[in-house]
Structures are given as structure tokens and as C-alpha cells.
Image: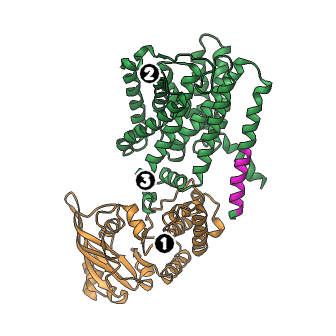
Chain colours: A green, B orange
Amino acid sequence: MDTQFAQRRRRELITAACLAVLAALVPLFVKDVYVQNMMVLTLMYAALSQSWNILSGYCGQISLGHALYFGLGAYTTALLFMKFGVLPWFGMLAGGVISALIAMALGYPCFRLRGHYFVIATIVIAEIGLLLFHNWDWAGAALGIDIPVRGDSWLKFQFTRSKLPYFYFALVLACIAWFVTWWLEDSKWGYWWRAVKDNPEAAESLGVVVFNSKMGAAAVSAFLVAVGGSFYAQFVSYIDPESVMGFQFSLLMALPAVLGGIGTLWGPILGAVILIPLTELTRSYIGGSGRGVDLIVYGSLIVLISLARPQGLVSLFSRRKRAAK
Amino acid sequence: MTALLETRSVWQRFGGLVANSDVSISVERGEIVGLIGPNGAGKSTLFNLIAGVARPTQGSIWFDGEDVTGLPAAERCRRGIGRTFQVVKSFETMSVIDNVIVGALVRTTVMREARRKAHEVLEFTGLAGRADVLAGELVPAEKRRLEVARALATEPKLLLLDEVLTGLTPSEAQKGVELVRKVRQTGVTVLMVEHVMEIVMPLVDRAIVLDLGKVLAEGKPSDVVRDPKVITAYLGDRHAVGT
């Protein structure tokens, strides 16, 4: 029975590697910049949603305030580069560490809250962060930061002529987020998180320190999301509070996981691959009023999913597998 | 050697209600002790104090020669107190084996070792055939068994069983009794709360009867059931007169 388990783990790893290689080959055939742009965003949201899933899916602490960490990552990288000339690679790391620390500092009071109260707290805190950045002159306040362009280079992680470097970086990011999840899934932390989600009281009786489990999940989750934020800042090269810390990012991190399957390994990727292109397409093809239409699309998808398949779309695959046995 | 578990004049008050008053009990290594008493006697309160869910208003709890009164539940588990819940609390979205692995992870962080231990415990508790089923899909009797399995995976010195035999069919309850005996044979001390006397009495070495938050009687099960005070507590004054 153990070998069966080990086999499943190995199969997951091989599947992921194959998918990554396939994804890496796509740009050889797709030269259209618009589509490439869409692929970059899809991979980025896959990575973000995967990271969100660690705290909210596995550990069950639903956060609708992860835009805060996304924005912190973006701002840390941009500010360090602009004010001190620190390379974005270090900015990325710094953003991750700062976000992880802030996530734990916020978790300290907030993890005493349960269920809806926790969700409300995360929304409010992210809004406070947004307001602070709106009024923080040194960080560009509401005007934002224009990241100075210093020519294409991997060192400065800036590319003006081609989207491809961003594509490959986003792919690596998605792979890292997936791999971290995969690795944690079969570790003490993975088991502790799922136990905490299902029943904190029982978990505590089995030696699980519930509070520490939540803190660990929050730190890992915030770190990865912040790295995504750093990447986004480099990708769009102009940031302001609304465009990196707005509520829509919190939503866009949660939705792919919810759509694909919350608390599952493949859910976020599957959800992102469906949701993000759909969003971009409705935005551009339905024209100027598209902003409203993509929201209608989200809404309908969520309603459909919660009616037809509350466990998310990945359950379609597992059901078929079970039937085949 | 000192007793494995000792409560020293423990009091627990909830506002004006005194749930435990001056309760001093002890459990020796290798015993099966039954904690019995009518509804509202304070059994569950005492049980939660021992497991570390709540702290006593007054008094102290000693385990394995150390004062554990201020320690949280998780730390007590690490020290060797395992427990089940009266209302089962399975990890419903996890498979049976994963439920047990959570318990095993207290003693090791090596996943392969935890998995091996979990299989061993499932074999021991007769759940091996259900290892890959979701805990949420188990029937109630199996869920009770899973509670015991999970607790055993933490390798407890003392196992606290909270009404694991209540509400089972006679044949299920019989299997439960056998399981508890088997557990004791492996060297685990058992303290069990029950209010169904017929099931517990043949099983336990010693019975402690609580009533209105106090220790009413204590001793061999055969003596305790004949104690007029105990009969009064369970059946009311009129029945006591005849004995």
C-alpha cells in the first residue's frame, strides 16, 4: 500500500514536469504578443493562487487580503531598486521576507478569530495597507512609482523588447509554487494544516500546535505571493497602490483555487488556465465596458461551481479515476 | 513510584456553577480505571481538565511525576496523554490513514516512519481494510475506532476514553471492550468515562464515581455498585431504602 502511495507521488511529479516542458515549448509556436501576455498572466495567477491555497486551502484560513502581500512584494522591489539601486532579485527576496514577517505579525492577533471573522479581518487589513500606501509620499503615494528603465538585462530583470523572459520567469514561479505545495503536502506541515482545517480541537489533542501551524502556513503563503508581486512590478514597470494592492488581486488569487478545487494540488493551476484567459478575452473582445463583463463571468462561474461541483473542477478527474478502477 | 496521573483537590467553577469540587483522584500505571457517574456529575469537566482543554480554577494536575496544570493540550499529548472525544471529531476530508498519521507525527517527523506506525495502529484497531476511505464516509462505530487509533498513534502512556462504548450495538460494544483490553496489554494505562454501568464494570479494575462534582465512591467495581450512596445517586432515594 505504501508503494502505491509512493507511486502516486512520483506520478504527480512526472506529470508536472511534462506539463512544464510542454508549457516551455508553447512560445516556439505562439508568437502573438497579446497571447504571450495572456500566458504570462495565467502562469502568474497560477503561482499566486497556488500560494494562496497553502494558507486558505490546506490550512483552511480563508484570506481575502492577500493583495497586501502582493503589493508589498511589488513595492519592496520597486522602492529598493529606485531609491537604493538594489537589484530586483534581492528586492524579490526582501519583499518575500518582509511579507512573511508581516503575515506573522498580523496572524498573531487574527488567528484567534475563526471562520467569517477571520475573512473580514483579512479584507480590512488589506484595505488599511492600501490606504497607507495611498498616503505614503516617500513611496510615491497615489501617483505610484515608475520603475526606471535601464535596458534589457537579466541582471536588472527588465525586458522591453520581448515578453519571453517574463514568460519563462512566470513559468519557473508557477513550478516553484507547485513544487513547494507538492513537497509540503507529504510533510508534517501538510498533515498539520489539513488537520487544523478539519478540526482544530482534535488536532490540538493529537499534539498539533494549531497556532504555530497557521503561522507557518501564513508565512510560506505570503512569501510566495510577494515574490509574485515583485515579478509583476517588473513586468508592468509602473505600479501604484490600486494596481498592485487593490481588492481585485485578493479575489483573483482566490478564484482559480476555488474554481479548480480548493485545498488540492492541481486546483489552482487548472482554475487559472480556465479563468485568466477567459477574463482577458472578455475584457478585450467585449470592448470598453469589458470591466463589468469579466466580473459577471467570475460571478457566474462561481455560482455554477458551487451548485454543480463544490469540490472544484479537479474532482471531475478523480471521480473518473475512481470509476475506472 | 508515584501514580501516573493525579489530580490534587481540583476545583472547576463556571460562574456560579461548581462543576468539580475538591476532586482528588489518582490512576496507577497499567490500570483500567472507570470514571462514572450520572449526567451532570462533572465527568466531562474533569476529563477536559486532565486532557488540557481547560485549566482548573484551583488545584493541580500531575502526570508522570510532573505538574502539568498549566500545559496546553498539545504539550500534554507530547508528554503521553492521548484522548478521544465523546462527540467524534474525525478529520472528515482526510483519509483514515491520514487521520492516524497526524497522530503519529508527534513522535516522528519522518513521513515514512509515521506512515508505517499508522498502518500498524490501523491493523491493531481493526481498521486496516478502511485505510484509504475518507473519514467522513465511516459508519459511527468505525469513527469511534478511528478516534482510538489516532490517539494510540501518539504512543500515549495514558489513554483517556470519553464514552467510546456509549451508543454502540451490544456486539460493537463487545468489540470495543476487547480493544480496550488489548490496549492495556500493550502497557497503556486507561482512564475511561462511561455512564453505561453494565459495560464498564466488568472491564475496569477500579471505578471512581462522581456525583454533583465530588468523588462519591471509589474502589472495586463490585463494591462500588453495591454502595448505597452510588445507588441513590443513580436511582434516587426511594431505591436506596430497600438495599
Query: Which residue has dot 3 on it?
Result: A210
Q: Amino acid at mark 1?
A: Glu
Residue lying farthest to the top in this orientation:
A288
Instruction: Report if residue A273 lies within the magenta region.
Output: no
Instruction: Report if residue A12 lies within the magenta region.
Output: yes
Instruction: Residue at 68% x, 64% y: name it.
Output: A2
Q: Nearer the viewer, mark 3 or mark 2?
A: 2
Instruction: Residue at 60% x, 31% y: name it.
Output: A45
Q: Nearer the viewer, mark 2 or mark 1?
A: 2
Q: Residues within 10 Å of mark 3 (few under 14, many from 20)?
A: many
Instruction: Check whether the beta carbons of the residues at disc 3 and disc 2 lie within 8 A of each other.
Output: no
Q: State the image quarter where residue A205 is shown.
A: bottom left
Q: Residues within 10 Å of mark 1 (few under 14, many from 20)?
A: many
Q: Quadrant of the C terminus of chain B?
A: bottom left
| Residue A258 in sight from this viewpoint | no
The x and y percentages for residue A308 are 64, 38
Query: Chain letter of disc 3?
Result: A
Span shown in magenta? A3-15
Mark 1 lies on a secondary structure that is loop
Q: State the image quarter where residue B234 is shown.
A: bottom left
Give left or right: position of B134 versus A74: right
Q: State the image quarter where residue A17 is shown.
A: top right
Mark 2 lies on a secondary structure that is helix
Query: Chain letter of disc 2?
Result: A
The x and y percentages for residue B233 are 28, 77
Mark 3 lies on a secondary structure that is helix
Instruction: Residue at 47% x, 73% y: name it.
Output: B165
Marking on residue A83: 2
Query: Which residue has dot 1 on it?
Result: B155
The x and y percentages for residue B119 are 61, 69
Compared with A287, A162 (above or below) is: below
